Amino acid sequence: MFGETRSTLPPHRTPGQQGPGHGRSVAATLARDRLGVWSVTAFVLAQVAPLTVAAGVLPTFWAVTGITDAPIVFATVAVVLALFSVGYLGLARQITHAGGIYPLIAHGLGKPAGAGTGLVAWGTYQCLHIGAYGMLGPATATLVTDLTGRTVPWWVCALGWWALVGILGVRDVGLSGRVLAVLSAAEILLLLTLSLIGLTHPAGGVIDTSTLNPTHLVAPGIGAALVIAVLGYVGFEGAPVLGEETRNPGRTVPAATYTALAVMGCVYVLISWAMATHYGPTHLTTTATEQGPGMLLGLPGGLLTRVGQALFVTSLFAAALAFHNAVNRITFTLARDHLLPNSLATTGRRGAAPWTASLTHSTLALVVITGYAISGTDPVVHLFFVLGSTGGLGVLLLLTGVSLAVTTHHTRTHALHRAALPAAVTVTLVVMSRLALTGFASLLGVDPDALIGWMLPAGYLLLAALGVTLASRLRKRQPDAYNNLGTPPTTTATPTSAGGR
C-alpha cells in the first residue's frame, strides 16, 4: 500500500555501510523544512492534550489530593518547566536530532547513558501512544450512543481511530501538523469559553480568589499535588523530536516550546480557577470524585456540552497521533544509530516519514487493543490510566536526566555561571521524581506492595539497562557507529525508491 524507500546516508557513514546483522543501509535523515513554528506548537499542544488534562487530570488533582489550589500549583509547575527549558532548549539548539532527549543525555552524561535513555524514551512514548486508545475508544462509543442511541463496542471505535493514526503516521508530517493545528485551536477556544462560563456563574454569586494564593504552596500534601500537576504538562518537551523536519530548528523549536508552555500555563490556571469558582472551593473534592470528566464537560449544558464531548474525543485522537509521531521518530533514530534493527530506519517515498517504524508501532498498538478487547478488561482504568500514568512517570524521569545532562555539560565546559539554574532545576526534578516513584502505587489506587506498583517503574530500569548493554556491544563491534551515537546528521533526506508500489 505504501512504497518503501531509503534516504541518503549521513556523512559519518560510508555508502553501503551495514548495520550489525542486517544486510541493508540505514536512512540518513527525515525530510527537512516541513514544519514551521505553528505546526510544531500544534504537535506539542496535541501531545499535552489540554482538554483531556482539564477534563481528566484536574478532577483527579482535586479528588486525590483534596487541595483546592490547583491554579497556583499549575502556575508554579509552568514556571519550573520554563526554567528547565532554558537549559534544555539551549543544548537542543546545538544538537538538532530527532531522538529528542536521548542525544542530549548522550552528549552530557555519555553515550551509554544516552542509549539507555533512548530506550526509556521509547517505552515512555509508547505507553502514552497506546494508552490513549483506552479512553479514545470508550469516549467515542459514549458519544455515538448519546447521539444515535446505538451501542458500539469501545474497541470498534478504538480501531477506527487506530487506522486513521496509522495512515497519517506514514504520510508527510506536514499533513499531521495541519490536522493537529485545527484540533488544538478548537480545544483552546472551547476551554476559554468554558472558563468564561465558569467565572460568570460563580457559586454563591461571588468570584473566589482564594485558590490563587501562593502561600498555599506550603500546605500539607503539596508534593503529591505538584506531581499530578506535572502530568498535565507531559508532552511539552516534544518539540526537539521534530527538529530535523523544521525550518530553522534553532529558532522554531524554542519558539514553539515557549509558546505552547505559555498557552498551557495560562489555560490551566484560567480553567481551574473558573471551575473552582463555579463549584465553590468547599465542594471541589466531592464534585470531582462524583463527576470526574463530567465536571468540566457538563459545565455549559445544552449544545455546548455535546461540542465538548466531541472535542474531548478529538483531543484524545490528537494526543494519540502526536505521540505516535514522536515514538516513530525516536525509533527511527535509535535504528539509525544502530541500537535497533536498521530496517526501522527506513523512510517513505512520500514525505520521508519513518515508514517501517510507524507500521511497527501501529501493529503493536493493534495487538494491545485486541488483547484488551478479548480479555474484557476495563480499558479506561487498565489501559488509559495505567499506561498514561506510567508514561507520565517516564517523562518526569527523562526531564530529570536531561536537566542533569545540561548541568554536567556546562560544568564540563567551565560555564559554571550557566550551570547554576539547571542545577537548581535538577534538584527540584529529583525531588518530584522521588515523590512520583514513592507515590506511584497510590496514584494507581493499589496497595503499596502490589506487583503493578513497582513492576511498571522497574520496566524503565530494565529498558535503561538494555540500552547500556546495546551501547557496549556497539562499542565493541562497530566503534565508528558508537562514536557517532546521538550525533546529529547534516545531510538532507532525498528519498529514492527502493521497491514497492
Image: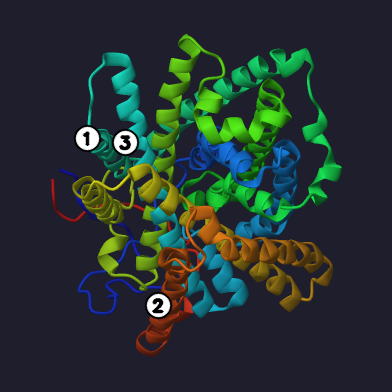
Q: Residue at x 60, y 19 (%)?
A: 194
Of pointers 1 and 3, the one earlier in the residue sequence? 3
Of pointers 3 and 2, the one earlier in the residue sequence? 3
Picture coordinates of residue 144, whole percent (x, y): 30, 22
Mark 1 secondary-structure assignment: helix
The answer to whether any part of residue 96 appears in the image is: no
Amino acid at the residue labelled 2:
Leu
Q: Distance between the Cα atoms at labels 1 and 3? A: 7 Å
Between disc 1 and disc 2, the foreground one is 1
Residue corresponding to mark 3? 137
Residue corresponding to mark 1? 156
Using residue 493 as the reference point, say whether residue 193 is left or right of it: right
Label of residue 177 in the image: none
Using residue 244 as the reference point, say whether residue 428 is left or right of it: right
Q: Quadrant of residue 466?
A: bottom left
Q: Residue at x 72, y 36 (%)?
A: 71
Disc 1 to disc 3: CB gap under 8 Å: yes
Amino acid at the residue labelled 3:
Gly
Picture coordinates of residue 192, whole percent (x, y): 62, 21
Mark 2 secondary-structure assignment: helix
**Quadrant position of the N terminus in the picture:** top left
Q: Distance between the Cα atoms at labels 3 and 2? A: 33 Å
Disc 3 crowd, CA 10 A, few/some/many (<14, 14-19, 20+)? many
Residue corresponding to mark 2? 466
Does 287 sit above or below residue 172?
above
Q: Nearer the viewer, residue 287 or 11?
A: 287
Disc 2 crowd, CA 10 A, few/some/many (<14, 14-19, 20+)? some
Amino acid at the residue labelled 1:
Val
